[in-house]
Every structure is written in structure tokens, then in C-alpha cells.
Image: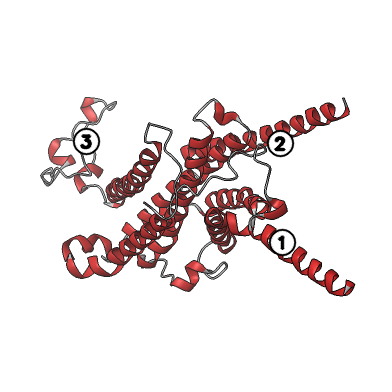
Amino acid sequence: MTSEKTARLAAIRAKNQVKTERSGGAGAPPASADPFAELPPAMPPQTLVLMLIAMSAGVFAAVVVLPTWLPGLTNSLLGPEPKAYWYLSRSSAFVAYLLLWLSMVFGLLMTSKMARIWPGGPVAFDLHQHTSLLGLILALIHGLILLGDRYIQADLWQILVPFGYSGYQIWWVALGQIGLYLLAVVGLSFYLKSRIGYRSWRVLHFASFVLFVLALLHAIGSGSDSDQQWVQLLYLISGGSVLFLTIYRILMSKNITKKLDQRGSA
Amino acid sequence: MSATPTLPRKDGYGLRELITIAALAGTIGGWAGLAFNQREEAIAATAQVAPPPAWVLEPPLIPTLVPLNIAPTRQQAHPQPPAPLTVTRSSR
């Protein structure tokens, strides 16, 4: 009889533990620790899916439909030396990098409480997610639009698989490809936060620093415009600002910990 | 009502829309800018590669810093009249 009671108790405990883990569990922060922990994703999944479909339709139109329907326009796109795809890839790369930088800045402003000054915590959180997802879409365009470029002649496999394309700066290009996947994981993890738990999500989110560095190295190493002064200035300002905000964030969190320790000892 | 609740809008400035529009405009504008830059580069390259007209390489009619008494006559300098000047984009 005693052993039966013990078994039932163990079963109830195991059931409760599973429930706790499903709801975020031990990883869930106290309500006062992080006001953004319980906020829902900024962009609904439907919107994200619609944007991805729109992107795919755009790429399909540029690569397949336009050459068939508009011979005059496609002369410039599919002439002996078509440059349009190459130009679009370069311009979207810059925009994707800037969006990624903005996402990093908003995220660091939020966690370092500097967002209280501007633009406010919830708005910074909203923009942080929005810019990262928009950056993900433009980074995909940056890669996939190259399918139309005849000079590079890269196929889908070479574009999507790291180290798959050996025609140009294989290492620098691969850094960008790896960064794209990290961006996808970090960006889409907003939608999985409640399932994977706050602590796992937080750990996963640290990959954003790695992916920003990868994107910056990819831009410097394989960018066609990296030798231009304004581009170097752009990289310097963006990289420098992220570094500054990261250091500030670390110092601030250390300061808070020290204050809490002092209060505890007092 | 949407199945997934979204964050209530508190910015009031439409920053999300502004960023989205700026991103699209930047992509299209960057494409146009690169295409324009390429066109200018092509024109400059054509101007460099194209050989100058023959009459440019000939000596001037009255060379400067040369005493007039030993300067070649017009007939000696140019047995044939120079080719007519054609104005092209590269020569402008």
C-alpha cells in the first residue's frame, strides 16, 4: 500500500514537472525581471508567411515571368551582360545589413534600458523584431536574386549551402550563408518563445551577436563596394555603435548585480 | 480578431511603416543608382578607349615658342586639310 502511494505521488510529481516545463518552467523569469518576457511576437505569423510568399513571387516574376512577357525590358535584364540581378543583390544586401544593424541597436537599447529615453521600451521591442524579420527577408532576396545573374551562374544549391559556391571568395561568402541561417533561427525564435521556454530563447538570442559579426565580415570580405570610403565609414559606424552598446550593456548589468549584492549583504 | 495578438501600437509615428518603406525604397534606389553609375562608367571607359582623331595628333598650324621665321608654312604643316571636326559625347 505504501509503495502504491509512493508510485502515485511520483506520477503526480512527474506530471506537474512536464506542465511546468511546457509553460516555460524554471526558465520563466519573474514578472518584474523582464517586462518584455510575456509580450507576443510583433509580426503575426500570417504576415510573415505572406511576406515570404510575396518575396518568392517577386523572385519568380523577375527570373521567369519578366523575360517572357516584356522583351524590351528584359533586354536590359537578360542581354549579353545583364547586370540588373547583380545590382539588386548588392542594394538589397546593404539594406539587409542596415536592418540587421537597426535590430541590434534596438535590442541593445531595450536591454540596457536606454530605450526609456527613446523610443520607449515596447516600441523598441516592436521595432527590434520588425527590423530583424524584414532583414531576414531582404537577406533572402540578396541571395536568391543571384539565380538570375548569368555571370555568376550559381544554382540554388550553391546559394543556399555554405561553401557550396566556390567561384568567388568562398570563405567570405560562406560566412554570409551561415549568418543567414543564424538570422533565420534567431528571427523565427520569436514565434517559439513560449514553446522552448524563456531561458532557451534567451540563450539562442545570444547568437544574434555572432550573426552580426558574420554579416559584417561577409560584407567587408566579399562586398564589391568595400573599397569605397563611404562604405567603410558605414561599416565603422555600424560596427562601432554595436560594440559600444554591447559594452555599455555588460557594464550596466554588472553594476545592477553589484547593487543587488550590496542590498543583500546590508 | 487575429489568432495571434500583436503588440498594441504605442509609437504613434508609424516607425514600422517608415522603416519598411525606406527599406524597399533603398533597395530599388540602390539598384537605380548602381545602374546609373555603371552607365557613367561605360561612357567614361568608351572615351578613354576610343583613339583621338588624326588631326589632334598633327602639329599646330603655328607652333608656339618657335620663331616665326623658321615656322613651317601652312602648306608644309598640312599638305592635306584636316578632317572635319565631329562632335561626339566623348569629345564633349
With respect to residue A88, does B70 lie above or below?
above
Mark 2 Cα shell of 10 Å, populated few (<14), some (14-19), many (≥20): few
Chain under callout 2: A
**Quarter of the image containing the C terminus of chain A?**
top right
* Residue A160 place in picture, x, y as percent: 50, 67
Give the CA distance from mark 3 to mark 2: 74 Å
Q: Amino acid at mark 1?
A: Asn
Amino acid carrying label 2: it is Ile
Give the letter of the chain under mark 3: B
Residue to which mark 3 is pinned = B60
Name the spot of residue B12 as percent of width and height, x first. Answer: 38, 31
User: Residue shown at 72%/52% (left/top)?
Assistant: A26
Q: Which residue is mark 2?
A: A250
Q: Earlier in the sequence, mark 1 or mark 2?
A: 1
Q: Residues within 10 Å of mark 3 (few under 14, many from 20)?
A: few
Q: Nearer the viewer, mark 3 or mark 2?
A: 2
Disc 3 element: loop
